[in-house]
Amino acid sequence: MQRYFINDRYNDDQPVVITGEDYHHIIRVMRMKEDDHIFVVFTDNTSAVACIETISSDSVGVRVVKWETETKELPIKVAIASGLPKGDKLELIFQKGTELGADRFIPFNADRSIVKWDEKKAKKKLDRWGKIVKEAAEQSHRNVVPSVTSPVSFKKLLTLSGQFDYTLVAYEEEARSGEKGNFSKTLSSVKKGQSILVVFGPEGGLTEKEVELCKKEGFLVCGLGPRILRTETAPLYVLSAISYQLELMR
């Protein structure tokens, strides 16, 4: 069944009404009719199976049939900070990272970022990114749509790092030197409900200066195995490893 995020909390006294793009998707794309069933997710992250009861020219009315009880979210909150890469790599990270359970995406301007953020196109870009993570969250049957921030400076990223319980920076030179314990140790220490920020460089990686600044802020520098991963591959590797360690092994 298709999943839709409702921009409201559930209220027994009010009908659940779906409008806008989701209405269009239900009627024009999925061609659903009355008595068909869908999943709905409310702003408090509760979700349920719902039955379509009414269809008008611009809205669909649904009734909750059965609440979902199984959690779909990672037991910890994972934020992915990516140095701005070229092309559509960032959108790939947003889409696949959402499917793998990321809670937050923080793009940042790294020293080796070739792409520069254009403020004139900011709203259009952010709207597109928001749509990408929403659709990926629906497809992967999540209860949370990850947040995507407007790109920040590296200095601002370091300031934001204080919000997290654990902070890691993936650095290819650590991988080359054989470091392989910091990521594993972190996953062994983190507790349910805690948060992790993982920083990744753009093409060309982070500079030594950036890594040193991370260290001064308390980041653990980690390698991700013997192979050097692309900027769009490394975040997905990390999220997959977190899921395996904290969901499949516990």
Image (cartoon, rainbow, N blue to C red):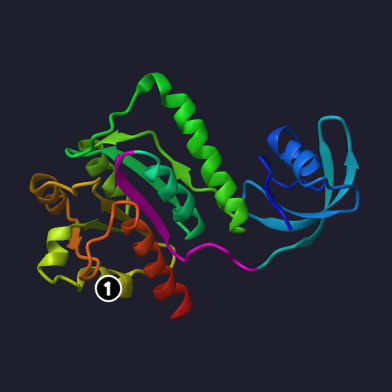
Magenta highlight range: 70-86
In the image, residue 247 lies at what x, y percent?
47, 74
Give the residue pinned by disc 1.
Answer: 184
Indicate the amino acid at tag 1. Answer: Ser
Q: Residue furthest top?
A: 120
How many numbered circles are shown? 1
Q: Is residue 10 left or right of residue 152?
A: right
Q: Quadrant of residue 197?
A: bottom left
Residue 13 in view in this figure: no
Residue sitting at x 30%, y 41% = 85
The quarter in which the C terminus is drawn is bottom left
Q: Who's the residue at 19% across and 72% down the image?
A: 180
Residue 75 covered by magenta stretch? yes
For the N terminus, give its image quadrant.
bottom right
Residue 79, percent from left and from top:
37, 52
Residue at the spot 36% in from the left edge and 38% down from the top edge:
87
Give the quarter of the image for residue 170: bottom left
Residue 13 higher or lower than 120, as above or below:
below
| Position of residue 86 measured from the top left corner of the image (x, y, whole percent) | 31, 39
Q: Nearer the viewer, residue 244 or 112?
A: 112
Of residue 75 and residue 99, the one placed in the foreground of this image is 99
Name the residue furthest bottom: 249
Tag 1 secondary structure: helix
